[in-house]
Amino acid sequence: MIDILEKTVAAPVQLTSGAVKQLKQIMEQQGIPSDYGLRIGVKGGGCSGFSYILGFDEKKSNDDEYSIGGMRVLMQKAHGIYLLGMEIDFVEGLDNRGFSFSNPNAKSTCGCGTSFSA
C-alpha cells in the first residue's frame, strides 16, 4: 500500500471579497477564458523599483497555483519573496477607484501605490 501525502500550501497573498467580486466581474465582461487564472507578480520598474503585475493569463511551467476566494491565482515561484503577506483590495471611493496593494515587504512605496522597493 502506498500512502500519498497531500501537501497544502497557503497562498502567499490574500484577496479581499471586494477584489474577488471585481475580478470575477472583469473576467465576465472581458470574456476571459475559464482556463485562465489571475496572474499576480512583480516586474522591475516604476518610480520605486518594482511594479505589481495583476492580469489574466495561462499557467506557465514556472508558476505556482493557488485558489483564493474561488479565484485561480498564478504566481511565478520567484515572486513569492516580494509578495508574501500582501493583501489586494478593490477600493471605490470619491477620490479613488481601483485595486490597492498592501505589501508588508515594501520598504517604501510611490504616491500612487502601484510600485515599491524591497
Image: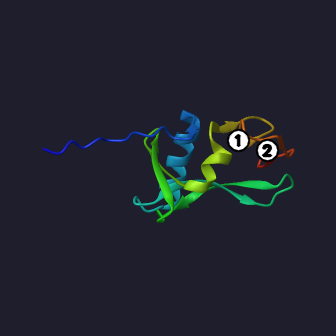
Label of residue 4 in the image: none
Separation of disc 2 and disc 1 at Cα? 7 Å
Residue pictured at 79% horizontal, 48% vertical: 116
Q: How many marks?
A: 2
| Displayed quadrant of residue 98 | top right
Q: Amino acid at mark 2?
A: Gly
In the orientation shown, which residue stands out farthest toward the left? 1
Please indicate whether residue 118 sits to the left or right of residue 85 in the image.
right
Q: Where's the N terminus, which quadrant?
A: top left
| Displayed quadrant of residue 100 | top right
Residue pictured at 46% horizontal, 62% vertical: 59
**Viewer-closest of 23 and 114:** 114
Q: Amino acid at mark 1?
A: Ser
Q: Secondary structure at mark 1?
A: strand
Please indicate whether residue 67 sits to the left or right of residue 104 in the image.
left
Residue pictured at 57% horizontal, 34% vertical: 16
Residues packed near mark 2 inside 10 Å, few (<14), some (14 to 19) or many (20 plus): some
Residue 106 in the image, given as x and y percentages of width and height: 77, 41
Please indicate whether residue 27 sits to the left or right of residue 113 in the image.
left
Residues packed near mark 1 inside 10 Å, few (<14), some (14 to 19) or many (20 plus): some
Question: In this figure, which residue is indicated by the disc labeled 1?
Answer: 100
Residue 21 in the image, given as x and y percentages of width and height: 52, 40
**Viewer-closest of 28 and 81:** 81
Q: Earlier in the sequence, mark 2 or mark 1?
A: 1
Q: Is residue 118 above or below residue 34?
A: above
Residue 46 in the image, given as x and y percentages of width and height: 82, 57
Label of residue 113 in the image: 2
Q: Secondary structure at mark 2?
A: loop
Asked if the residue at tag 1 contacts the one at tag 2, i.e. Cβ–Cβ closer than 8 Å, the answer is yes
Please indicate whether residue 88 sits to the left or right of residue 33 in the image.
right
